[in-house]
């Protein structure tokens, strides 16, 4: 029986999924072009793997869901504390 060498959709250990760029675009609601730009970002590139079957052209780019989610966390915007001066300047009132 021939061994299946395709990339697994699910990992058994923690359920981490591997996405190609089209699947990641659907998962993240971002465009493939944006993801490609983030992969090439010189300061904070999106972690990815280039999967290339032997002798079969360019291959494809894949990103793990876990790595993508962790990478996105660096861009999270934290809400200001209720007593913060910026909070007051922006016109929000203390409750």
Image (cartoon, rainbow, N blue to C red):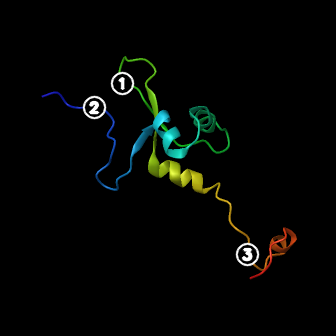
Please, is residue 5 above or below residue 72 in the view?
Answer: above
Please, is residue 78 above or below residue 44 in the view?
Answer: below
Tag 1's secondary structure? loop
Dot 2 or dot 3: first in sequence order is: 2
Give percent across and percent down for residue 80: 74, 70
Q: Residue at x 27, y 31 (%)?
A: 5
Between circles 3 and 1, the one closer to the viewer is 3
Dot 1 or dot 2: first in sequence order is: 2
For disc 3, the neighbor class at 10 Å (few under 14, some 14 to 19, many from 20) is few
Residue at which label 3 appears? 81
For disc 2, the neighbor class at 10 Å (few under 14, some 14 to 19, many from 20) is few
Residue at which label 1 appears? 53
Q: Quadrant of residue 88?
A: bottom right
Tag 2's secondary structure? loop
Tell me whether the residue at label 3 lies in contact with that at label 1, contact meaning CB atoms closer than 8 angstroms.
no
Give percent across and percent down for residue 53: 36, 24
Q: Residue at x 52, y 39 (%)?
A: 25
How far apart are labels 3 and 1 at the CA level? 51 Å
Considering the image in quadrants, where does the C terminus appear? Answer: bottom right
For disc 1, the neighbor class at 10 Å (few under 14, some 14 to 19, many from 20) is few
Residue at which label 2 appears? 5
How far apart are labels 1 and 2 at the CA level? 9 Å
């Amino acid at each position: 029986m021939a061994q299946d060498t395709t990339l697994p959709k699910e990992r058994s250990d923690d359920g981490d999924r591997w996405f190609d760029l089209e699947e990641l675009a659907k998962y993240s609601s971002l465009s493939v072009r944006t993801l490609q730009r983030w992969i090439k970002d010189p300061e904070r590139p999106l972690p990815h793997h280039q999967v290339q079957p032997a002798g079969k052209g360019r291959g494809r780019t894949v990103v793990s869901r876990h790595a993508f989610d962790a990478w996105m966390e660096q861009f999270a915007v934290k809400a200001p504390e209720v007593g913060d001066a910026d909070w007051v300047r922006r016109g929000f009132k203390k409750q």
